[in-house]
Amino acid sequence: MQDKTMWKKAVCRYLFYTLGASALLTVPRVLVHPRRVVRAVMSCFAMWVPALGAWLVTRQYPGISFRFGLKKCRWRYFLAGVLIPLGYFGASFGVCLAQMPAACFTAFHLPTPAQTAGALGLLALEFLRTLGEEIGWRGFLYPALEGLYGLRRSLLLGGLAWSAWHYPLILGGLYLGGTPCWWSLPVFTVELVSIGVVLAWLCERSGSLLPAVAMHAVHNLAVLALMPAVQNWSRAAYLFGEQGAVTAAVTAGIAAIFLIFGWRSARKSPKNF
């Protein structure tokens, strides 16, 4: 068995690289307000910081490696990764629609062929962007924490770290607009910790990062697709979206179901610990 002290150092080094780089990348975006193209490029680079941090750690600590890679897996796990975010966002959107006046929402229209092609292109791009995050958070950090602290603590600690990685963007006003930070930070944290449970389960059951990457990409695109339907976002943001209370409640319920029924009561630690 490898020295757990080395793994703890590797985890701390990974968090130092990833969280520190995220904070540093946010500063120019807040102070300079670069143009849209530059912001998009910086955003893509930022989403690959977790993968870069994990790669650096594996180079510095011999024997430290990734448990999950981009291996082929059964299609049902990939399909689950696509449908789950559509389910919890659809449920939260439905509750929000029922609670608020119909005038707050615009009508849906079938997309044109050009819009459909653009959506598929965005999905491919988002898949590449979220791949960088999943390599770091689920490919490296979650297995490392599980080997050190067990399943439930690893899911909690990993989810908190993943949430904290987004905090500079939220505090800088670049992410989750529509609600104050005292609301968005805790609600967003509950949501991400819950979603992290499902992403980790997909990796465990499939043995691959692909279903988690698919779920992450669809999650991001679902927000972008549904938000234009909301006319009065200042009201709806408290219920729907990534800082919505309904979304956080639904994802927390899904995470509880996965924790109770998704894993066996007793699991062995990873072989590389």
Image (spheres, helix red, strand yellow):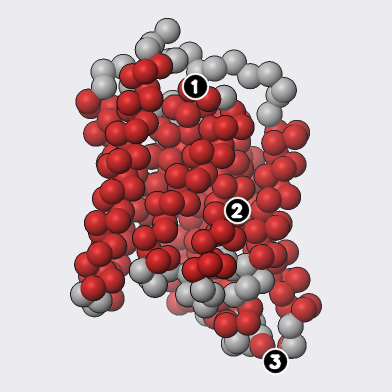
Viewed as shown, does residue 30 lie left or right of 74? left
Identify which residue, 210 or 110, lies in the foreground: 210
The residues bearing labels 2 and 3 have C-alpha atoms spaced at a distance of 30 Å
Percent coordinates x, y for residue 151 in the rendering: 59, 28
The residues bearing labels 1 and 3 have C-alpha atoms spaced at a distance of 51 Å
Examine the rendered structure and indicate whether residue 13 appears above or below residue 81. Answer: above
Pointer 3: residues within 10 angstroms few (<14), some, or many (20+)? few
The residue that disc 3 covers is 103
Q: Is residue 186 visible?
A: yes
Percent coordinates x, y for residue 74 in the rendering: 59, 34
**Residue 186 is drawn in which quadrant?**
bottom right
Percent coordinates x, y for residue 249 in the rendering: 70, 58
What kind of residue is marked 1? Gly
Name the front one of labels 1 and 3.
1
What kind of residue is marked 3? Ala
Name the residue rendered at 47%, 51% in the picture: 163
Pointer 2: residues within 10 angstroms few (<14), some, or many (20+)? many
Name the residue rendered at 61%, 43% in the picture: 198
The residue that disc 2 covers is 190
Name the residue rendered at 68%, 29% in the picture: 263
Viewed as shown, does residue 106 lie left or right of 48? right
Name the residue rendered at 60%, 41% in the picture: 197
Examine the rendered structure and indicate whether residue 120 appears above or below residue 59. Answer: below
First in residue order: circle 1 vs circle 2: 1
The residue that disc 1 covers is 147
First in residue order: circle 1 vs circle 3: 3
What kind of residue is marked 2? Val
The residues bearing labels 1 and 2 have C-alpha atoms spaced at a distance of 23 Å
